Amino acid sequence: IKKWYVAGRFSGWDPEDSDANGQGASALIPHPGLAMWPAGTTITDIAIYRTQLGAGYFLRDDLVVKANFFLDDYREKDYDGKLDVSGIILSLNGTF
């Protein structure tokens, strides 16, 4: 088994009604993504695109340590990048 691996992905949340007015079918899903919403704001119908790069190391065949860097890009022009989020997700994953 190879001990190290690298990975990348691009994914998106792009509801049909993506004008960020808080109405529409996607309004039933509270706070998609990882942004901290301004106080008193609930905006669910907004497009989000995530770019993610990661690496992992297999401690054993059934146990891997992962580190992922991500950037969530919120596409609503009224927020002008104020909701964009970047960060690192560290995890320990096992299979059984």
Image (cartoon, rainbow, N blue to C red):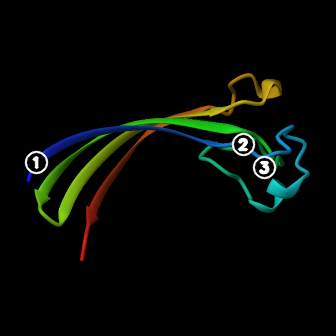
CB atoms at circles 3 and 2 under 8 Å apart?
no
Q: Is residue 50 above or below residue 22?
A: above
x, y percent for residue 65: 23, 53
CB atoms at circles 3 and 1 under 8 Å apart?
no
On the rendered image, what quadrant is the N terminus found in? bottom left
Neighbourhood count class around disc 3 (C-alpha, 10 Å): few under 14, some 14–19, many 20 upward: many
x, y percent for residue 71: 51, 33
Label 2 sits on residue: 14
| Disc 1 secondary structure class | loop
x, y percent for residue 21: 90, 42
For this view, does 93 lie left or right of residue 57? right
The structure residue drawn at horizontal position 72% and vertical position 44%, both measured from the top left corner, is 37
Residue lying farthest to the bottom in this orientation:
96
Whole-Å distance between the Cαs marked 3 and 1?
40 Å
Q: Which mark is residue 84?
A: none
Label 1 sits on residue: 3
x, y percent for residue 5: 21, 42
For this view, does 43 lie left or right of residue 70? right
The amino acid at mark 1 is Lys
Neighbourhood count class around disc 1 (C-alpha, 10 Å): few under 14, some 14–19, many 20 upward: few
Image quadrant of residue 16? top right
